[in-house]
Amino acid sequence: MPSFVHSDAIQVHICQKFMEKFIDKAHGPKDRSPELQSLRAERVPDPQKDEWTASGKKSDQALYLLVTCHDDQICFLQMERSYYKDGDIEIAAFFPIYIHLVDIMINIIKKSFTFTQFQSKNYQYVLALVFAIEEINKNPHLLPNMTLGFDLYNVMHSDMRVIENPFIWLAGLEKDVPNYTCRKQSKSVAVISGTSIAVQMGTLLELYKVPQLTLGSFEPLLSDSGQFPSLYQMAPKDTSLALGMVSLMLHFGWTWVGLAISDLPKGIQFMSDLKVELQKNGICVDFVELIPATEKSRSSFRWPYHIQIIKSSANAVILFCETDSLIGVSFQTWERLMTWKVWVTTSQWDFANSEEHFLLHSFHGTLIFSHHRSEISGFKNFLRTANPSKYPEDIYLSRFWSLAFGCSVSGASCKTLQNCPLNASLESLALHHFDMTMSDGSYNIYNAVYAVAHSVHEMLLQELELQPGNKRAKVAFSPWQLHPFLKNLQFTNSAGDLVNLNQKRNLEAEYDILNFWNFPYGVGHKVTVGKFSPYVPQSQQLSLSENLIEWATGITETPRSVCSVSCSPGFRKAPLEGKPTCCFDCTPCLENEISNQTVDMHQCVKCLDHQYANTERDRCLHKAVAFLTYDDPLGMTLVCTALCFSVLTTVVLGVFVKHRDTPIVKANNRCLSYILLIALIFCFLCSLLFIGRPSTATCVLQQTTFGVVFTVAVSTVLAKTITVVLAFKVTAPGRRMRHWLLSGAPNSIIPICSLIQLALCAIWLGTSPPFVDTDAHSEHGHIILLCNKGSVTAFYCVLGYLGSLALASFTVAFLARNLPDTFNEAKFLTFSMLVFCSVWVTFLPVYHSTKGKVMVAVEVFSILASSAGLLGCIFLPKCYVILCRPEKNALKGLRDRIVPKESEVLKSSS
């Protein structure tokens, strides 16, 4: 129970008001906990001592917040400043056991008000020091015939008071005068202190060349042998700590994290190293919260504390603090605000010993990186038996005992304890009050004591070898003489771990990953759930047993800490402007692109030409080979159409052959009619070459057959047209044109035109013939096999030549359209050429606007349509007359009406 000791009521009232003001500043006036509200000074009459005590509910806060309002003669400040154990040689130690949060002089009443926080977890340092020294003194093989003692001081965190006790140790006076001492010669041969304290007092101790060994984590700034030649760091290097934490983030997929870093130089350096590793592995930082680690930096912080952490959407927070700092004070405001987050921290700051117990613990489920080490045998048993009666000279143990077990303090030296539980022991305390497991700092203190002992032992052996006659004489030496032995010291401690003080050979640390479990009423436990080692291949550096991990309160499964939900397969990341790379939108992949990885992809991958993306766009499928087949509905329709028209043309040819002696067949040269009908049959049949699986032979035959057959058909139409024109234009019996007409000269047009087309086809086949090609883009999921024209110029030359013949036929027929129409087919020829030209003029734009099988179908349709146009326009009217109106297909009764020119036509046709 904390006590307030005063001499008058006015002082008590001021102390109470000041305490309430202090509570309001730390927690806000509306957030006082019942425990804090109970810390009020109330008058309890005591005529002998006139002592004021805090009444009300006993609070665990008393364990680490000792509040005193006193004058300079009262108990706590009258305690000895050090815990001293005599020995032939001694080790000076400076540990942060308690700190003064407020130390203000009220000018009105000239009294000092001191708010003192006892750091219970740091008291284990004292016990580790005592344990190591007792072990060495009992060891007959190490420093025989010589006892080892210590001189232990508390050290403040205030920049103004951090070297106060080191000055007292050096000078032996309250008013410190450097280089002058008022006490007997010091027997201390080395100093053990915290890392951050060593930065400030190292320069002072360097003046005396005193070996200084640090218990905290490795500090790169102190590894400069030029600036700190007398300083030795017991902890291994933490160069792989950032990599280990990032590996843990990657293992759980936490890409959106927060940083809470102490504002000490080492914290800033660690933050810089960590950011490099985070950026290298694609992890983004949501916020950076600098936590005050000294009294001066803490005074600049105002309520509300840590607002960034409270508002952050990051569920994983990396916490890096020093063991001997004010970080625990800063975190007192977190206990009700920081639940449901996963903390990743180091064992240098043990929050388990810094907080009160409560059901929804802020740090339940925390993952802790602790230096891998073996257990020191006998240490836990030593802690079980440690008590004030065993070590009555230990002022800190008495104070801790009184706070932990509610004992009352009496006596001028504040060492006499009363009303303590009978079976009180450190083992019975809750984890947040005292941890029985050796901490990193205690382990380093243990090794530091042994390092000094081994160095002294080796130095004494060397002296005895040089002076063998003085074996029983005590060897006097100065602390600086230990440096040659410490610099190259290497030994194996009782746990079997190698201890190396050579900074150049100091290895990187391996880490055990601990999981903190906190249960109601202060029952806490740390479970080893994994390990990180930088000495194995990267894929094996991190090992975890996820089934052993207890997550933060309210989380039943592995938590997620991402800014944006990962994009599922088929989507890619689209960065958001002004946001970190971990914040993004998910955009679907474009056509024929996929993203098939479980991690977020910045770009989709395009499928190969012979593949296509499925509907979900998460994998590429092989395209099926397709072409215009006979089984395809479109192909089957075209085949049936071509065969039907071929049969129809054959029937028409049969009709014409059967009625070859009739006037309507004999008109316009029946031989030309036969040739035209046969050419049309081949025109219909050549379309079948375009259907089915393409090959080199079919590709060549497609174009040459099409060009030659249609040239024969169109040239035949041209010959028939010229025959009609010549028959009606020749009037005189002896003219040469009449001779050409009667001799059948127009029939020679057919072979001439056909030879020209054959020459063009030969040039085409000789330069760039058609070949089998694939079209992988026209139809989704299919590779279309088709015939490539080879030379597009040659193809259009053939087509253009056909067009010129058709245009010539159309022009001649158009000029003969008004001739007498008895058995005259000039109009039919005109209309047939009009249909033919219309089909192929329409073909060109449609052909170029289609792809794949449709393009082939358009070409086949154009062949069938133009051929059907010739058949229908020229021969169907004649078949109608032959079969349905035979009376019009006779000369009887019409001879008197036949003009001479028509008679010439009949003669020339026959």
Image (cartoon, rainbow, N blue to C red):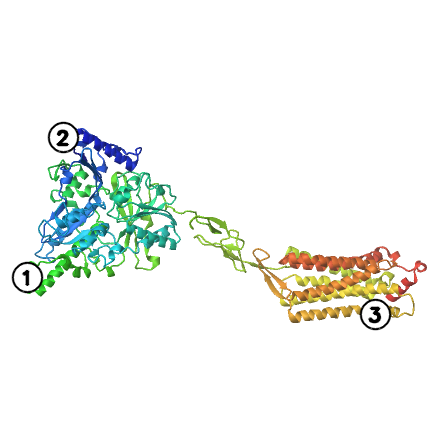
> In which quadrant of the rendered view does residue 557 lie?
top left
Q: Earlier in the sequence, mark 1 or mark 2?
A: 2
User: How many numbered badges does the structure rendering display?
Assistant: 3
Q: Is residue 310 above or below residue 136?
A: above
The image shows residue 44 at horizontal and vertical percentages of 17, 28
**CA–CA distance between discs 2 and 3?**
151 Å
Confirm whether residue 447 shows in the render.
no
Return the residue at label 3. Answer: 745
As drawn, the residue found furthest toward the right would be 896
Q: Please indicate whether residue 561 sits to the left or right of residue 616 in the image.
A: left
**CA–CA distance between discs 3 and 1?**
146 Å
User: Which residue is nearer to you in this view: 631 or 785?
Assistant: 785
SS for callout 2: loop
> In which quadrant of the rendered view does residue 650 lie?
bottom right
User: Which amino acid lies under the numbered mark 3 shown in the image of this protein?
Assistant: Ala
The image shows residue 767 at horizontal and vertical percentages of 65, 71
Return the residue at label 2. Answer: 50
Q: Earlier in the sequence, mark 3 or mark 1?
A: 1
User: Which residue is nearer to you in this view: 63 or 908?
Assistant: 63
